């Protein structure tokens, strides 16, 4: 299975599908996912419920799997433990601290969009990987 950025798991929480993710959208999505995983409705995932979540995460995408762990040692996984990894990724990506992950923050390596909505290969940072202008004509040793 191909590698995916950790942010790829966050974008499905974009409830209004505008390409940005707010902290509120993340929290609402995590609460819905937790409620679905809490089959026994105890407010804390037991071993069987946690195993089911972990197996589903592994099946969905091995490269971004973050297993649920009972960090608090309570014998089950509460909502804060369930939400810890996605919240951490959100906080790391929210570089300006405004509580919203813009499309650029969610995928910083994607080409920037032009005003017409198309992507521009010349937008963003351009790096010369040829060491200062080693074009085929310069490499041939001919001078103009």
Image: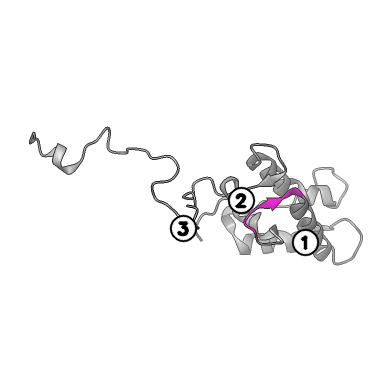
Q: Residue at x 80, y 63 (%)?
A: 37
Q: Residue at x 47, y 52 (%)?
A: 114
Which residue is disc 2 drawn over? 7
Which residue is disc 1 drawn over? 33
Q: Residue furthest front?
A: 115
For residue 41, above or below residue 124:
below
Q: Residues within 10 Å of mark 1 (few under 14, many from 20)?
A: some
**138 horizontally vs 33: left or right:** left
**18 horizontally vs 69: left or right:** left
Between residue 44 and residue 12, name the one nearer to us: 12
Q: Quadrant of residue 55?
A: bottom right
Image quarter in which the C terminus is found: top left
Which residue is disc 3 drawn over? 118
Q: Which residues are magenta?
A: 18-23
Please say if the residues under marks 1 and 3 sit with CB atoms less than 8 Å apart.
no
Could you tell which of marks 1 and 3 lies nearer the N-terminus?
1
Q: Residues within 10 Å of mark 2 (few under 14, many from 20)?
A: some
Q: Residues within 10 Å of mark 3 (few under 14, many from 20)?
A: few
Q: Position of residue 42 (x, y in %)?
A: 92, 60
The colour mode here is one colour
Q: Position of residue 43 (x, y in %)?
A: 90, 57
Q: CA distance from mark 2 to mark 3?
A: 22 Å
Element type where label 3 sits in the image: loop
Q: CA distance from mark 1 to mark 2?
A: 17 Å
Between residue 1 and residue 51, name the one nearer to us: 1
Element type where label 2 sits in the image: helix
Q: CA distance from mark 1 to mark 3?
A: 33 Å
Q: Position of residue 95 (x, y in %)?
A: 64, 37
């Amino acid at each position: 299975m191909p590698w995916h950025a950790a942010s790829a798991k966050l974008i499905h929480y974009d409830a209004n599908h505008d390409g940005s993710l707010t902290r509120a959208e993340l929290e609402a999505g995590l609460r819905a996912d937790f409620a679905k995983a809490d089959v026994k409705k105890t407010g804390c995932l037991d071993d069987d419920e946690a195993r089911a979540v972990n197996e589903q995460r592994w099946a969905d995408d091995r490269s971004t799997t973050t297993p649920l762990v009972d960090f608090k040692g309570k014998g089950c996984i509460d909502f804060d433990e369930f939400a810890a990894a996605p919240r951490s990724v959100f906080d790391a990506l929210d570089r300006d601290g405004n509580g919203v992950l813009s499309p650029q923050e969610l995928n910083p390596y994607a080409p920037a969009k032009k005003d017409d909505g198309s992507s521009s290969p010349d937008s963003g940072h351009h790096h010369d990987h040829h060491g200062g202008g080693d074009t085929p004509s310069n490499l041939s040793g001919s001078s103009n």
